[in-house]
Image (cartoon, coloured by chain):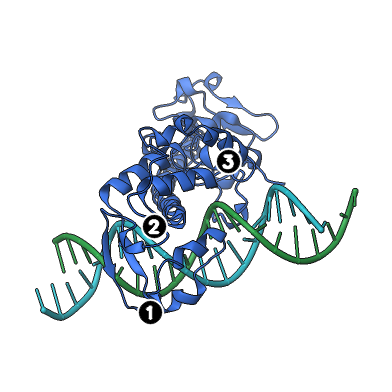
Chain colours: A blue, B green, C cyan
Amino acid sequence: MMLDKEDLGLSLSLSFPPHHPHHHHAPLHLNLMPSSVSSSSSSAAVTNHKSSSSSYADLNSDPTAIPFLRGIDVNRLPAADCDEEPGVSSPNSTVSSISGKRSERDQPATTGSGGEDLDADEEDGDTSRKKLRLSKDQSAVLEDSFKEHSTLNPKQKTALAKQLGLRPRQVEVWFQNRRARTKLKQTEVDCEFLKRCCENLTEENRRLQKEVQELRALKLSPQFYMQMTPPTTLTMCPSCERVAVPPSSTSSPPVVAATRVGSSPLPMMGTAAAHHHRSMAAINPWAVGGPFNVLRPRS
DNA sequence: TTTTATACGCTGGTTACATCA
DNA sequence: GGTGATGTAACCAGCGTATAA
């Protein structure tokens, strides 16, 4: 069934939930960060999809137990009955009347999937849909809710909608869009991270190739042999003839001098990385706390 | 037990309006 | 006031999962 990103080994998972049904949609899965990243966005919260909704239901049985509803009187009626009058559904909102194509197009279609969509368009006889701009207060409450849970179960959605004077569908859409924004932002961060990694590896590769050239020169110049570092500082792998320089004998940054003696230089990626010499971890940019760790977003 | 239909929620992508420089 | 860029509410299509028949 579903594979956790940990199971995948690599998993680029740009901070999206491991159990998400749309794992096939994930464009990348390269776990570049600790799974704890962006806890507010999704990784933890979205695991509730379907399976854990019951736990939310339990929470909702006692509204006061819902973290994100702190200070919200769930029993209080919305400022307006949103299902009847969208124009006043959000007293604090900026509402503008539109007459664009969207309004015309939406009229019959309305529901994307959920049954609650139905109530989104049944409100008035006016065929035009009002485009609503959420107020700052509404957005703030939604943001707070999102920090607690990036997904909502139906009860939470309904409670939040009532509290904010919005339709449940609006709350649902807001969360969907918010998740999309979060993911987009994370993708941007990860792209930047990969870019830095690529640059760093390129530089490392350049440096190592230069080092190989120097070592070859030394090997071909007996007069310099005597000046070489004592062989005890080098470790030769008997199976592959690679020379690994102990960290103590290397200059900073740590070097992986996994160089096949007498052969042409090999690209770093795909060879050294795949090699069994775990010394590669010394410069493993994916490693937690690695050189680019500073780029990781803080949750 | 397996298959099928249905409901539901999610994502990625898109559209169109609101706002701002 | 007109215009392009940006943000975002709302939507659609497609998919996976849960559930009941």
Choose between A242 and A133: the one closer to the eye.
A133
- The structure residue drawn at horizontal position 32% and vertical position 78%, both measured from the top left corner, is A99
Q: Residues within 10 Å of mark 2 (few under 14, many from 20)?
A: many
* Marks 2 and 1 close (CB-CB < 8 Å): no
Q: How many marks?
A: 3
Query: What amino acid is labelled 1 in the image?
Result: Lys
The alpha-carbon separation of the residues under discs 2 and 3 comes to 30 Å
Q: Is residue A287 above or below residue A189?
A: above
Q: CA distance from mark 3 to mark 1?
A: 37 Å
Could you tell whether B10 is left or right of A241 in the image?
left
Q: Position of residue A49 (x, y in %)?
A: 59, 45
Disc 3 designates what residue?
Answer: A47
Q: Are marks 3 and 1 in contact (CB under 8 Å)?
A: no
Do tag 2 and tag 3 residues touch (Cβ < 8 Å)?
no
Q: Determine if marks 2 and 3 fall on one subunit.
A: yes
Q: Label 3: state its secondary structure.
A: helix
Callout 3 and callout 1 share a chain: yes
Residue beneath label 1, please? A101
> In the displayed structure, would residue A189 be above or below residue A44?
below
Local packing at callout 3 (Cα closer than 10 Å; few below 14, some 14-19, many 20+) is some
The mark closer to the camera, 3 or 1, is 1
Q: Quick check: A282 left or right of A92?
A: right
Q: Which mark is residue A82?
A: 2
Three-letter amino acid code at the position of disc 2: Cys
**Residue at point 44%, 78% (across, down):** A105
Callout 2 secondary element = loop
